[in-house]
Amino acid sequence: MPERRPDARRPDTRRPDRARRLAFDALRAVNGEGAYANLVLGRLLDERQLPARDAAFATELVAGTCRRQGTYDLVIAGASGRALSSLQPAVVDLLRLGTHQILAMRVPAHAAVAATVDLTAATVGRRVCGLVNAVLRKVAARSYDDWVAELSRDEDRLTALGIRHAHPRWIVAAFADLLPADELESALAADNESPTPTLAVRPGLANVSELVAAGAAAGRWSPFAAGWSGRPADLPAVQQGRAGVQDEGSQLVTWGLTRAAAPYGPWLDLCAGPGGKSALLTGLARPEDGALLAAEISPHRAALVAANLRAYPSPRAQVVVADATSPAWQTGSFARVLADVPCTGLGALRRRPESRWRRSPADLDALVPLQGRLLRTALDAATPGGLIAYVTCSPHRRETSGVIEAVTSTRSDVTVVPAADVLPQIPDAYVGDYLQLWPHRHGTDAMFAAYLRKD
């Protein structure tokens, strides 16, 4: 546990330790400003330069609190006997941080309560310290399992699983629609495990053996992948742009686009930001194919794509700011097209802990029509005989097979290429002709891919 030093100005309190103060500031940015937990946490850690042990404590405190926030809110409401809307948002975040320490971290309850009260005094004010102290003591009176049992007593199975594993019920139901009943709980539990960062080498610029020599572990499925437990920025290959952070599932679905026959000609990455897939495609493209065109509607994300491509010679790829629903290119121009469409991101809940509480079924109502338009654009962009990959970082049926089937049912110029023919020998990864990866099965994000040929 981080060191806590006395506050000489207030003999009856202690100055909050730096790790908990950083965690509070990060959580306020997430819940008060809509920040992404991983980005704000990384920025604050760089700015404040905590010792390694304190940095690890702060990271778990932020990520763990964000993951289980919905369940912790039920616990806090039960312990306080009041709606969370009646409390200041900053106080709610303090209670969430304290609850995570008490119920899920190896912090003695009395220490977690005292440290959170000190943090309350330093951030919100002493007037609410009594409330925070009283609520957290009631939280500490039960274990996590006991709280879950109490909160789930009158709930159905899916709601109870959502409470135990900190997922909204609609996400639990979406997973239950896809998985055998005996796998559902494992899939939910896997979303609460922090993944080891995975790197992808840029083909032609680096190889996995270089990363393994530096202490990384070769990936399980992708020939470009290596797991790295330290800071990726410490590796020369990452510093130089010859490798980058990219989930192994993301690498696989991109690699699949290059593994079936297609005519010669340029390639298109339709929604390219932030650029990891573009970098992999650039390295895999044949010299005779010409340049990859990486299109991205957001100027900021287009800049990230360019940064990911910086190590390649400039003729190999071109980055443009463009709206793929109103394409600036001629139809039938590309031999291979990647449509990695915007989605709910339900497949990346391990790495984006707050996102499960930000998304709702209503998001699908806006995303699914956009996904259909982007798939039609991708099909139109391909030359006859060309190959198209439709990719989402979500397993939800509405934005995966549902989109494919809705679009292909209206066209006579498309054939589905079985994913098992493109990426063979990945166990339990195929749903009909499509690829569906899972964290609990494959150790990757829950990536979906369909490979289509333009007739």
Image (cartoon, grey):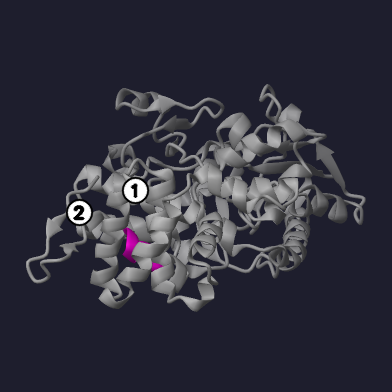
Q: Which mark is residue 109?
A: 1
* Location of residue 296 with respect to 385 vertically, above or below: below
Tell me where residue 139 appears, x and y as whole percent.
44, 55
Residue 227 sits above or below residue 37 on the image:
above
- Residue 76 part of the magenta segment: no
Residue 244, by quadrant, is top left
Report the residue marked by disc 2.
Answer: 49
Secondary element under disc 1, as helix, strand or loop, is helix
| Vertical side of 338 occupied by 360: above or below | below
Instruction: Magenta stretch: give its range.
Output: 23-29
Q: Position of residue 285 (x, y in %)?
A: 56, 39
Is 419 on the left or on the right of 48, as rendered? right
Residue 268: in sight, yes or no? no
Quadrant of the rendered image containing residue 184: top right
Q: Residue at x 43, y 57 (%)?
A: 138
Left or right: residue 252 compared with residue 203: right
The residue lying toward the viewer, choosing from 4 and 392, is: 4
Residue 83 is situated, as x and y percent measured from the top left of the image, at: 55, 72
Mark count: 2
Quarter of the C terminus within the rendering: top right
- Residue 186 in percent (x, y) is at 63, 34
Identify the image quadrant of residue 374: bottom right
Specify which label sits upstream in the sequence, 2 or 1.
2
